[in-house]
Image: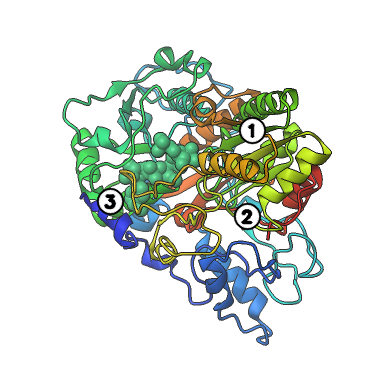
């Protein structure tokens, strides 16, 4: 087993910057959550961690201490942390000067001091925009029991006036890891285009994820505007993706050998854990390298962000499957359509697709426990739907009915193989090459149990099962994701030139921000069963509690 896989399966947290450890809060929680969770929602390891927070709310200064601590945690790592004397040059990114003056910038850089298009390093974006006046308010996220308003600011993304890399000295690499997601090509394309606008000539793609740094016979792919011009017209990744891969030290050796000093990493929480470890290792070796992530996860399970790219497209595409299930069910005598959608630990796609389609009667997500059997179970409700409506549609997320914490660090490994009354499928303990748990097929299970149930009660039922997951993942990005990918790709390049490393870029309250990687991957973002959105979904489906 390689080091990465070992770290994942043994629950050993990969190295993180010690400066980020906090006396006040544990990692990953911008706020305590005093919501009273309904008892049938999945018990969470981090709910326990939250309860153990040690903020003394009797301290009159707790709010300013909290804010100070928040600022520390969300401070974005910079090359000057390691190279205090690192020199800058005026930015070569200026939209008034689109054509490079000279091939080699011998006459200086085409910057324009008068152009008001740069971001000031002190610009901030407000992370939370609702002032909850009570912890009982729907979806309330409160820091203290009184729900005191505390502003939480994160760093605004975008081009800076001074840059820390000379474009002609840059060798930039892009790597795409994990599973596919609509929009990967769009992001690759805009990273390349933006790098070229800065004046970078040496741009390469690393094939097949982190494996491309080590596996024999996988050669770098030279990239240019010409190469990437039309890649967004199809789904997938021009560079290929993979799970698993070499140890971090080997990746960093490879960066050194290849002379790569900017690495753009497109991937989910696993990939970002890797990117952060690469960043830490580069710092430890005093390498002047910028490692910048762009969150890619169709599951939309990255913290702090409004959404991740590909999610809108996935929801749109999922609706087609739901519509087919509806047509099948509606056209059959006692028809029941079951659609399984992606969502390893988060039910965002299932919830949003159910809401969008308006054709779903039962939406099942990992965050909310349910029984299949019994007087309040899903099957009894299906019988009611068949009796009253004549047909029914079920939309289930792949991680529903199964414990599904992603073992990113030792906090979450605790629950990895725990048993719960609401785990419907036998666990296999199998993991994929990246250490992710391989689930049983909840869709097939529900299909089989539904058939059996109706057979046993002597009611005819025509059950159809649709699993569109890989069809959804492979499509090209829709218009709104295309725009999101464009902005994220551009901002990733701006972040690297600005000298930041160990950061990722996301959309936050419709604005774009840079985050330190550990803060967005400390655990997967999940649907809050007390949120207005889940309540809206329940209103739309009309489903009861299945407990
Ligand atoms: N904790 C970790 N530390 C370092 N690398 C990791 C970690 N978890 C996953 N990786 C690596 O990141 C890549 C993608 O991870 P994976 O979980 O498959 O997808 P995703 O990034 O979409 O979550 C794989 O090459 C895997 O080896
Ligand atoms: O079959 P694969 O390629 O391992 O992918 C399955 C997984 O991919 C996902 O769609 C998303 O995975 P990522 O975290 O890599 O984006 C999950 O919902 C699903 O469990
Ligand atoms: Mg993942």
351 w.r.t. 476: above or below: below
CA distance for labels 2 and 3: 40 Å
Residue 513 placement, left or right of 177: right
Tag 3 residue: 4
Alpha-carbon distance for marks 1 and 2?
Answer: 29 Å
Observer-nearest residue: 345 or 497?
A: 345
- Residue 386's quadrant in the figure? top right
Quadrant in which the C terminus appears: bottom right
Mark 3 or mark 1: whose residue is earlier in sequence: 3
Element type at mark 1: helix
Residue at 78% x, 60% y is 138
Please identify, in this view, whether the residue under mark 3 or under mark 1 is nearer the observer.
1
Specify whether residue 497 is in view. no
Mark pair 3, 1: CA separation:
32 Å
The answer to whether residue 238 shows anywhere in this view is yes
Q: Position of residue 245 (x, y in %)?
A: 26, 41
Q: Is mark 3 within 8 Å of ligand 1?
A: yes
Residues at badges 3 and 1 in contact (C-beta under 8 Å)? no
> Helix, strand, or loop for circle 2?
loop
Reply above or below: 506 against 411. above
Q: Residue beneath label 1, please?
A: 315
* Element type at mark 3: helix
Mark 2 residue's CB less than 8 Å from ligand 2: no
Q: Crowdedness of circle 2 by 10 Å Cα count: few (<14), some, many (20+)?
A: some
- Residue under label 2, please give it: 373
């Amino acid at each position: 087993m390689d080091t990465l896989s070992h770290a994942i399966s043994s629950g050993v947290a990969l190295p993180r910057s010690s400066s980020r450890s906090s006396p006040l809060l544990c990692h990953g929680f911008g706020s305590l959550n005093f919501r009273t969770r309904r008892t049938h929602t999945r018990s969470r390891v981090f709910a326990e961690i939250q309860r153990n927070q040690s903020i003394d709310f009797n301290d009159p200064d707790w709010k300013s201490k909290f804010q100070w601590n928040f600022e520390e945690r969300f401070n974005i790592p910079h090359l000057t942390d390691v190279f205090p004397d690192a020199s800058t040059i005026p930015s070569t990114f200026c939209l008034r000067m689109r054509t490079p003056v000279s091939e080699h910038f011998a006459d200086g850089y085409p910057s324009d001091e008068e152009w008001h298009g740069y971001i000031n390093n002190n610009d901030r974006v407000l992370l939370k925009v609702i002032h909850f006046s009570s912890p009982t308010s729907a979806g309330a996220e409160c820091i203290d029991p009184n729900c005191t308003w505390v502003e939480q600011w994160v760093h605004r993304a975008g081009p800076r006036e001074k840059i820390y890399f000379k474009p002609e000295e840059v060798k930039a690499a892009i790597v795409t890891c994990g599973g596919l997601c609509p929009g990967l090509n769009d992001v690759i394309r805009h990273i390349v285009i933006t790098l070229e606008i800065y004046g970078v000539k040496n741009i390469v793609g690393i094939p097949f994820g982190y494996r491309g740094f080590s596996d024999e016979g996988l050669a770098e792919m030279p990239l240019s505007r010409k190469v990437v011009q039309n890649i967004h017209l199809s789904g997938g990744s021009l560079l290929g993706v993979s799970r698993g891969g070499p140890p971090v030290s080997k990746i960093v050796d490879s960066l050194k050998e290849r002379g790569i000093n900017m690495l753009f990493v497109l991937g989910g929480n696993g990939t970002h854990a890797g990117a952060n470890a690469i960043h830490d290792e580069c710092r430890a070796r005093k390498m002047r390298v910028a490692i910048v992530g762009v969150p890619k996860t169709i599951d939309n399970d990255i913290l702090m962000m409004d959404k991740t790219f590909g999610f809108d497209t996935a929801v749109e595409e999922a609706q087609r499957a739901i519509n087919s299930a509806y047509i099948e069910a509606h056209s059959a005598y006692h028809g029941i359509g079951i659609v399984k959608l992606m969502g390893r630990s988060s039910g965002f796609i299932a919830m949003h697709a159910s809401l969008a389609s308006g054709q779903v009667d039962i939406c099942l997500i990992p965050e909310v426990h349910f029984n299949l059997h019994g007087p309040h179970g899903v099957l009894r409700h299906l019988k009611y739907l068949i009796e009253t409506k004549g047909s029914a549609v079920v939309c289930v997320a792949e991680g529903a009915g199964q414990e599904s914490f992603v073992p990113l660090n030792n906090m979450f490994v605790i629950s990895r193989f725990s048993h719960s009354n609401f785990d419907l499928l036998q666990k296999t303990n199998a993991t994929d090459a990246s250490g992710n748990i391989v689930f049983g097929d909840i869709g097939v299970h529900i299909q089989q149990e539904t058939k059996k149930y109706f057979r046993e009660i002597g009611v005819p039922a025509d059950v159809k099962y649709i699993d569109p997951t890989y069809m959804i993942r492979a499509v090209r990005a829709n218009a709104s994701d295309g725009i999101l990918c464009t902005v994220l790709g551009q901002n990733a390049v701006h972040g690297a030139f600005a000298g930041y490393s160990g950061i990722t870029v996301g959309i936050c309250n419709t604005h774009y921000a840079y985050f330190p990687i550990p803060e967005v991957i400390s655990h997967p973002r999940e649907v809050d069963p007390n949120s207005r959105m889940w309540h809206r979904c329940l209103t739309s489906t009309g489903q009861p509690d299945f407990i």
